[in-house]
Image (cartoon, helix red, strand yellow):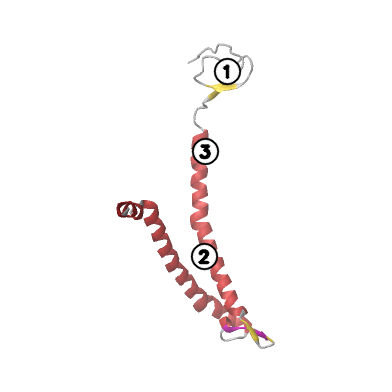
Amino acid sequence: MLNEFKKFILRGNVVDLAVGVVIGAAFNSVVQSFVKDIITPIISIFGGSSRFAEAHFTIRGSQFMYGDFLDALISFLIIAAVVFFFVVQPINKLSEMALRDKNTLEPETIKCPECLSEIPKIAKRCMFCTSKISVED
Protein backbone atom coordinates (compact mmCIF):
# COMPACT_ATOMS: atom_id res chain seq x y z
CA MET A 1 0.00 0.00 0.00
CA LEU A 2 2.86 2.37 0.79
CA ASN A 3 4.42 1.71 -2.62
CA GLU A 4 1.13 2.55 -4.32
CA PHE A 5 0.93 5.82 -2.37
CA LYS A 6 4.51 6.68 -3.33
CA LYS A 7 3.72 5.90 -6.98
CA PHE A 8 0.61 8.11 -6.79
CA ILE A 9 2.48 11.04 -5.22
CA LEU A 10 5.29 10.89 -7.76
CA ARG A 11 2.95 10.84 -10.77
CA GLY A 12 3.29 13.87 -13.00
CA ASN A 13 -0.30 15.05 -12.53
CA VAL A 14 -0.02 15.31 -8.75
CA VAL A 15 3.28 17.18 -8.91
CA ASP A 16 1.91 19.54 -11.59
CA LEU A 17 -1.18 20.18 -9.49
CA ALA A 18 0.92 20.91 -6.40
CA VAL A 19 3.11 23.35 -8.34
CA GLY A 20 -0.03 25.01 -9.76
CA VAL A 21 -1.54 25.46 -6.30
CA VAL A 22 1.67 26.95 -4.88
CA ILE A 23 2.10 29.32 -7.84
CA GLY A 24 -1.59 30.24 -7.64
CA ALA A 25 -1.32 31.07 -3.94
CA ALA A 26 1.77 33.20 -4.55
CA PHE A 27 0.09 34.97 -7.47
CA ASN A 28 -2.99 35.58 -5.30
CA SER A 29 -0.91 37.31 -2.65
CA VAL A 30 0.76 39.49 -5.30
CA VAL A 31 -2.62 40.50 -6.73
CA GLN A 32 -4.03 41.16 -3.24
CA SER A 33 -1.10 43.43 -2.47
CA PHE A 34 -1.42 45.20 -5.84
CA VAL A 35 -5.10 45.91 -5.22
CA LYS A 36 -4.59 46.96 -1.59
CA ASP A 37 -1.49 49.09 -2.14
CA ILE A 38 -2.01 50.50 -5.66
CA ILE A 39 -5.60 50.25 -6.89
CA THR A 40 -7.57 51.15 -3.75
CA PRO A 41 -5.48 54.25 -2.95
CA ILE A 42 -6.22 55.48 -6.48
CA ILE A 43 -9.93 54.83 -5.88
CA SER A 44 -9.66 56.60 -2.52
CA ILE A 45 -8.40 59.75 -4.25
CA PHE A 46 -11.72 60.04 -6.04
CA GLY A 47 -13.86 58.73 -3.18
CA GLY A 48 -12.51 61.09 -0.53
CA SER A 49 -11.80 58.35 2.05
CA SER A 50 -8.20 57.78 3.13
CA ARG A 51 -8.66 53.99 3.48
CA PHE A 52 -11.06 52.64 0.87
CA ALA A 53 -10.87 49.07 2.23
CA GLU A 54 -12.32 50.34 5.52
CA ALA A 55 -15.26 52.07 3.80
CA HIS A 56 -18.53 50.91 5.30
CA PHE A 57 -22.07 51.88 6.10
CA THR A 58 -23.99 51.06 9.24
CA ILE A 59 -27.58 49.94 9.62
CA ARG A 60 -28.92 49.38 13.17
CA GLY A 61 -25.44 48.82 14.55
CA SER A 62 -24.30 46.38 11.85
CA GLN A 63 -21.35 47.45 9.72
CA PHE A 64 -21.31 46.51 6.06
CA MET A 65 -17.71 46.66 4.77
CA TYR A 66 -18.35 47.38 1.10
CA GLY A 67 -14.80 48.69 0.61
CA ASP A 68 -13.29 45.37 1.66
CA PHE A 69 -15.76 43.54 -0.58
CA LEU A 70 -14.84 45.73 -3.56
CA ASP A 71 -11.14 45.02 -2.92
CA ALA A 72 -11.85 41.28 -3.03
CA LEU A 73 -13.98 41.72 -6.17
CA ILE A 74 -11.24 43.68 -7.96
CA SER A 75 -8.68 41.00 -6.98
CA PHE A 76 -10.94 38.26 -8.30
CA LEU A 77 -11.46 40.07 -11.61
CA ILE A 78 -7.70 40.57 -12.09
CA ILE A 79 -6.96 36.89 -11.36
CA ALA A 80 -9.81 35.74 -13.63
CA ALA A 81 -8.55 37.97 -16.45
CA VAL A 82 -4.99 36.66 -16.12
CA VAL A 83 -6.16 33.04 -16.09
CA PHE A 84 -8.40 33.66 -19.11
CA PHE A 85 -5.83 35.51 -21.23
CA PHE A 86 -2.72 33.51 -20.27
CA VAL A 87 -4.16 30.00 -19.76
CA VAL A 88 -7.59 29.50 -21.35
CA GLN A 89 -7.05 31.37 -24.62
CA PRO A 90 -3.65 29.78 -25.42
CA ILE A 91 -5.07 26.31 -24.71
CA ASN A 92 -8.08 27.04 -26.93
CA LYS A 93 -5.75 28.22 -29.73
CA LEU A 94 -3.61 25.08 -29.41
CA SER A 95 -6.70 22.86 -29.46
CA GLU A 96 -8.01 24.68 -32.52
CA MET A 97 -4.67 24.24 -34.31
CA ALA A 98 -4.63 20.52 -33.43
CA LEU A 99 -8.16 20.08 -34.78
CA ARG A 100 -7.30 22.03 -37.93
CA ASP A 101 -4.33 19.73 -38.56
CA LYS A 102 -6.51 16.69 -37.92
CA ASN A 103 -9.15 17.86 -40.40
CA THR A 104 -6.59 18.27 -43.20
CA LEU A 105 -5.69 14.59 -43.08
CA GLU A 106 -7.01 12.27 -45.76
CA PRO A 107 -10.57 11.10 -44.99
CA GLU A 108 -11.01 7.57 -43.65
CA THR A 109 -14.35 7.00 -45.37
CA ILE A 110 -15.63 7.12 -48.92
CA LYS A 111 -19.10 7.09 -50.49
CA CYS A 112 -20.37 3.91 -52.09
CA PRO A 113 -20.84 4.60 -55.82
CA GLU A 114 -24.11 2.61 -55.83
CA CYS A 115 -26.03 3.67 -52.70
CA LEU A 116 -23.93 6.74 -51.66
CA SER A 117 -23.56 5.48 -48.06
CA GLU A 118 -20.43 6.30 -46.04
CA ILE A 119 -18.18 3.25 -45.83
CA PRO A 120 -14.62 2.71 -44.61
CA LYS A 121 -12.02 3.54 -47.23
CA ILE A 122 -10.42 0.11 -47.00
CA ALA A 123 -13.74 -1.74 -47.56
CA LYS A 124 -14.00 -4.09 -50.55
CA ARG A 125 -17.80 -4.30 -50.39
CA CYS A 126 -20.45 -1.86 -49.27
CA MET A 127 -21.95 -2.92 -45.96
CA PHE A 128 -25.32 -1.46 -46.98
CA CYS A 129 -25.93 -2.58 -50.57
CA THR A 130 -23.16 -5.24 -50.80
CA SER A 131 -21.91 -3.91 -54.11
CA LYS A 132 -18.27 -4.54 -54.87
CA ILE A 133 -16.02 -1.47 -54.41
CA SER A 134 -13.21 -1.02 -56.89
CA VAL A 135 -9.98 0.10 -55.27
CA GLU A 136 -8.53 3.03 -57.22
CA ASP A 137 -4.98 4.07 -56.30
Q: Secondary structure at mark 3?
A: helix
The location of residue 122, given as percent across then percent down, is 49, 19
Residue that badge 2 annotates: 79
The location of residue 29, given as percent across then percent down, is 45, 71
Residue at image x 66%, y 84%? 57
Mark 3 or mark 2: whose residue is earlier in sequence: 2
Residue placed most toward the observer, 56 or 34:
56
Q: Which mark is residue 3?
A: none
Q: Secondary structure at mark 1?
A: loop
The answer to the question of whether label 3 and label 2 lie on touching residues, with beta carbons closer than 8 A, is: no
The location of residue 28, given as percent across then percent down, is 47, 69
Q: CA distance from mark 3 to mark 2?
A: 30 Å
Q: Which residues are magenta?
A: 54-58
Residue at image x 56%, y 81%? 53
**Please, is residue 129 above or below residue 33 in the view?**
above
Q: Is residue 101 magenta?
A: no
**In this rendering, the label closer to the viewer, 2 or 1:** 1
Amino acid type of the residue that numbered disc 1 sits on in the rendered structure: Met
Q: CA distance from mark 2 to mark 1?
A: 55 Å
Residue at image x 49%, y 51%? 90
Mark 3 or mark 1: whose residue is earlier in sequence: 3
**Please, is residue 27 above or below residue 137 in the view?**
below
Amino acid type of the residue that numbered disc 3 sits on in the rendered structure: Arg
Q: Quadrant of residue 45?
A: bottom right
Amino acid type of the residue that numbered disc 2 sits on in the rendered structure: Ile
The answer to the question of whether label 2 and label 1 lie on touching residues, with beta carbons closer than 8 A, is: no
The location of residue 55, given as percent across then percent down, is 61, 83
The residue carrying pointer 3 sits among few (fewer than 14), some (14 to 19) or many (20 or more) residues within 10 Å by Cα, namely few
Residue that badge 1 annotates: 127
